[in-house]
Every structure is written in structure tokens, then in C-alpha cells.
Image (cartoon, rainbow, N blue to C red):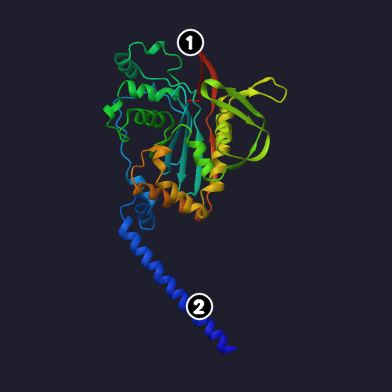
Amino acid sequence: MGKRKKSNTNRLLVLVIVLAAVLAGVICLYINVVKDDPVFQFVKHLFSPDNGADTIRSRRTASDKPYDLTDNQRYYKELVNKNSINVLIIGPDETSGSYDTLMIVSLDDRNNTVKLINIPRDIYIDYSNEFKNDLKKAWPKYASSKGIYKINASHVLGKRVDYKNGEGRFKNPEYDFTADIIEEVFNVYIDDIVFIKPSSLRKIVDYFGGVEIDVPYLMKYSDPVQNLKIDIKKGLQTLGGKDAEGFVRYRQGVDEKGKYKSIGDIERKKNQVAFVKAFISQHLNIKNLGKIITIFNDLNSYIDSSVSNPEQASDYGKVAEKLYRNKFIQESEEIECKSVDIEGIYYLELRRN
């Protein structure tokens, strides 16, 4: 009996040695062939000893605005810890190009929290006279454009005035202007920007196998102009890419009795936050690390981002790993505002200092 056990142990040892040798050969081959591959660089940096959060914070620069962009418009309270890392997620409207979604994902590695702040797109921005003068020079008829003072149109104005001549920290007048507006109004420094390209949400959700979420009510809406058809039943279910896009875009439609129903932008923001929370908790975890790394090589087809190289991306990977290891807390923050009519246009007015 003892000899048989020893024999089995020897065979196992030989097998382990052979597998180790094969694995070592594969790794050496991989290093020689793909050492310049973005995924390899991402993984290599991911396991370096540098602190990802500190590295991200070290890249911060002063906004250096030419003047105040607003007429002293300041939100009445602080939304994030000053040391939190803040990423602005932008989702465009597929037809108009306006920013349909503006969401700040705030990562507080020191207090182990992830806070989601959804900025309603209809917020009125009280631009300063200095900025209006510059805008008038670049776009004499700007005042006749409806809704131009909504925050979801800020990128249009930044592009019109060629904000900072395209030499701001994101090297993009649309992103730089939007980020500086958010910092001035909400006192939240934007470390990086992720612009989700149209229809990419569908692809990403399908790639991860859908998102389970409790749909609060029937969502039924159709708009041939936008090629948008939403038909999602109420209740707990797993949404594929098409329905996930419908869930986060739904604002109005018909109820079970066929009557018109509108939930408004603020209620839609609650649904978007619920969706992001569900996606994070279900898919951004260690067991999906392989999928996350695999999709990294194809990110350009899904998003445009200020995170421009594998090393910067892996800094965020380190932050995420630390948050997951410490069982982070998810929070969300609602922006307090009220409906107002300004020159016949619907806006949301912020609660100010």
C-alpha cells in the first residue's frame, strides 16, 4: 500500500515538473513575441509595486481657466473627498450628439467607497459675461440656439470657442470645457474621461452576459427617428445589451393601459445609477479578470478615453483590486435641483450656496 502511494506521488511530481516546464516555455515565448502588446504591458504594470491611486493623483494639474466660466455658480455642498479619484463617464445621444449621460464615478481608496454621481443633463449653467462675450465672437447667433445653457450642451460651447486652443489637460476643447465646468460648479476635479461610443453599451453588456436588475415598471417606447424601440417588462430579469440600452435611456412611453407616461430626467438618472451599481457588483470582479483583460485590446472600438496607455489603465486596475479586496461600499448621490422655465425653455436649477 505504501509503495503504491509513493509511486502515485512520484508520478504526480513528474507531472507537475513537466507542466511547470511547459508553462515556463510558453511564458518565455509569450514574453518574446508580445512584450510590446498593450495587454502584456497592462498586466505587467498591474503587478508592479507602485500605488495606482497615488500615481493617478500625481498626474493632476491646475485647471488654469482664463477666467471664471460661470457667474459664481456653486453647488451648495461638497460631493466628494478631495483625494477621491473622479472619472467622468459620458454617453452621447445617438441622433443629436448632445451628452445624454454625465456620470461621475468617484473612487475613494482611503475610505474604501465608490460613489456614483449622475448629473442631470438639463441643469442650467449660469455662464459668466466673460465667457458669453467670447462665445458671441466665435458664434454670433448662439443665443438663438434652444437649450444652449444646459450642461449637456457644454461640449458644444467648448468646441465653438476652441477652449484652451485644444491644449488643456485632455487635449480636447469639448472634454476640457466640460470638465472645468463640473469642477467650478461642483468642486469635483475630473481625473479622466470615458466617452462611450454609440451602441457600445449593447456590446459591452452582451460581452459580459447581461445584467440582472429589477425593472421598476413597464418600459415601452418607440422612436423610429432614433431607431429606438424599448419594450421591457416590469420585474427582476437579466437584460441583454439591447434592453440594457433601453433601460438606461427610457424617459417616457406608455403604461400597461396604453396611457402616456413620463418619468423625467431625474428618475431616469436613478435608473442609470441602479444599472451601473448592478453591473459593477455582478461583473467587475476577480473571476472576470480574464474577460476584462481580453476586452482591453478592443477598447478603442467601444470607448474614447483620456486613459491613453496600458500603464495608466493598470493604475485603475490597482485601485479596483484594492477596493474589491477591502469589500468596498457603493454609494450614490442625487443632485438637488428644481424645474424652472427660462425664456420658454425647460431647465433644472441647482441648489446653490
Label 1 Cα neighbours within 10 Å, binned few <14 / some 14-19 / many ≥20: few
| Left or right, residue 291 beside residue 210 | left
Q: Nearer the viewer, residue 137 or 349?
A: 137
Q: Are marks 2 and 1 in contact (CB under 8 Å)?
A: no
- Name which residue type carries label 2: Leu
> Residue 164 appears in which quarter of the rendering?
top left
Q: Which mark is residue 12?
A: 2
Q: Nearer the viewer, residue 190 or 243?
A: 243
**Is 48 rendered above or below residue 267?**
below
Rounded to the nearest whole Å, what is the CA distance between mark 2 and mark 1?
80 Å
**Is 164 rendered above or below residue 276?**
above
Q: Earlier in the sequence, mark 2 or mark 1?
A: 2
The residue where tag 1 is placed is 343
* Mark whose residue sits in front, 2 or 1: 2
Q: Looking at the picture, how far across and down is residue 153, in whole percent?
A: 42, 22
Q: Looking at the picture, how far across and down is residue 112, in whole percent?
A: 49, 49
> Considering the image in quadrants, where does the N terminus appear?
bottom right
- Name which residue type carries label 1: Glu
- In terms of secondary structure, where does tag 1 sit? loop
Which residue appears at 69% of the width and 19% of the height? 259
Q: Looking at the picture, how far across and down is residue 301, in whole percent?
A: 41, 38
Label 2 Cα neighbours within 10 Å, binned few <14 / some 14-19 / many ≥20: few
- In terms of secondary structure, where does tag 2 sit? helix
Which residue appears at 48% of the width and 49% of the height? 111
> Residue 31 appears in which quarter of the rendering?
bottom left
Specify whether residue 193 is in view. no
**Is 138 rendered above or below residue 20?**
above
